[in-house]
Image (cartoon, rainbow, N blue to C red):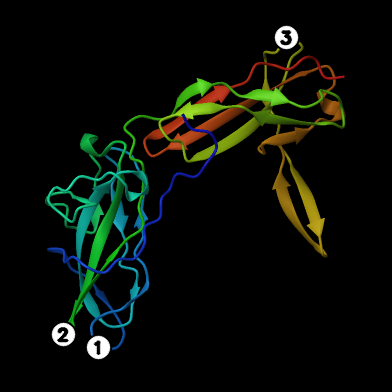
Amino acid sequence: MARRSWLMISGVALVGMLAALGAATASGDTTGPPVSTVGPIVKGLPGVGKTIRVTNGSWSTSATFTYQWLRCAANYKGCSNVPGPPTYTVIPRATAATYTPAASDVGHVLDAWVTATNAAGSTTVLSSGLGPIEARSPGVRHRPWIGGMKKVGQTVYETDSRWTRSPYMWRDQWLRCSPKGDACVPITGVRQQCGNGTCIPIKIGVQSDYKLTKQDVGHRMRVKVTAWNGAGRTTSTSDPTRIIK
């Protein structure tokens, strides 16, 4: 079960194992083996059939690069040795800078060894991770509920939405509905939030809370929550509130 939390998992730089195949270069000195200055990052959507890629990061010298993708459990725990180091599972033949997750990757985090090589030697570091990989969009375990006092001038808020299949991003959309709770329309608009002499535009109706106005009197409110994971998105809408007074 997932509530609102970020599930993108970052790796740590490790030095060790050499990878195979690949090609790319970075600029800089050629004195000594390459030293990683900014770690590589895995980018893309963590869904089956959606291609992801690993960046080279930044290095202290010019280098050529090779790659080896890894399949790990969340937080890099409980990985099988097939046939890599004891705590990591090496995905056979996954040695390009890009990789397309398959059904066997569902529930795992994907990261990659990136090896930089120059005339003086090689250095291997571990990228950040991406996942868990999902094959289907999020499932709704519990619909959202609207809390707070239902009166003009008071702030109501969306709470208690629960999901399956690891959503990593959410968006709310507040709805102003008829007295029956149907015929709903999205609340839209922009307000200025100012401080220290600077103002920034803030969208109305798409935050996790909403301040009731005179326009809401005689209506019922609902909130629609959309959740994303690597495979897609799913929407769930709350029951209507009582009529706003």
* Circle 2: residue type: Ala
To which residue does mark 3 refer?
Answer: 180
Residue at x 73% of width, y 56% of height: 200
Given residues 191 and 136, the one toward you in this image is 136
Given residues 119 and 232, the one toward you in this image is 119
Q: Tell me: 10 left or right of 219.
A: left
Distance from Cα at disc 1 to Cα at disc 2: 8 Å
To which residue does mark 1 refer?
Answer: 30
**Secondary structure category for the residue under label 1:** loop
**Secondary structure category for the residue under label 3:** loop
In the rendered image, residue 107, in percent from the top left (x then y), is placed at 32, 37
For the residues bearing labels 2 and 3, Cβ distance under 8 angstroms: no
Residue at x 30% of width, y 55% of height: 53
Residues packed near mark 2 inside 10 Å, few (<14), some (14 to 19) or many (20 plus): few
Distance from Cα at disc 1 to Cα at disc 3: 73 Å
* Circle 1: residue type: Thr
To which residue does mark 2 refer?
Answer: 119
Residue at x 74% of width, y 14% of height: 178
Front tag of 2 and 3: 2
Residue at x 49% of width, y 22% of height: 141
Q: Tell me: 151 left or right of 6.
A: right
